[in-house]
Image: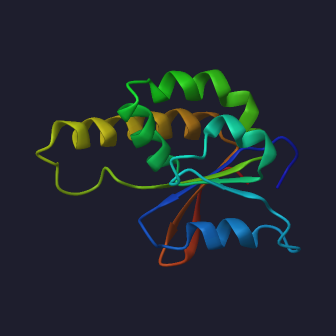
Amino acid sequence: MEENAVHFILGGRSQGKKEYALSLKDDNSFKVLDLAEEDNSIYDCNDFDIIINLHEWVKHTLKRKEEPLRIIKDMVLLFNEKIITGDEIGCGIVPIDSFERLWRDETGRVYQFICKNADIVDRVFAGIPVRIKGK
């Protein structure tokens, strides 16, 4: 990965995003921050190389009545040299539950911002990465 690059990897659930992210370094020395665990905070990202489950952080943040997109915009410089993964959650049936719709919409906005500012964007499907943006 090039210096200061932000690399975003998205794809469906259990499609191999984390495995692909880990494969990007030969010596397996990456430290992984799993945002699916509620106790983990995106504010701790400086201590990690890979940030996984960004969509879950968006959900936790919305439940705390905070604004995920505003937080991400304030933190964007902290993502330099990071690999970030998130599930695609907006493709499919629109949920009846208003919070579930809000979560999908806000996750989409966060992903759009990160993709716009990322140097590299990949989509992983069935374990196969496809480059969407970058070299």
Asked whether 123 or 106 is in front, the reply is 106
- Residue at point 40%, 55% (across, down): 88
Q: Decide which of 26, 41 is in the foreground and name it.
A: 41
Q: Quadrant of the C terminus?
A: bottom right
Corner quadrant of residue 22: bottom right
Position of residue 133 measured from the top left corner of the image (x, y, whole percent): 62, 50
Residue drawn at 64 percent across, 73 percent down: 19
Residue at the far front in the pictured view: 39
Residue 64: x %, y % from top left: 40, 29
Q: Is residue 111 above or below residue 7?
A: above
In the image: residue 62, left or right of residue 19: left
> In the image as oriented, which residue stretches furthest toward the left?
96
Q: Can you say which quadrant of the picture contains the N terminus?
A: bottom right
Horizontal and vertical percent position of residue 85: 57, 55
Q: What's the image's color scheme?
A: rainbow
| Position above or below: 105 against 135 | above
Residue beneath the point at 53% across and 32% down:
113
Q: Is residue 124 left or right of residue 7?
A: left
Q: How far across and how far down the image is residue 3, in percent?
A: 88, 45
- Using the image, determine if residue 130 lies above or below residue 62: below
Residue depicted at x 72% and y 44%: 6
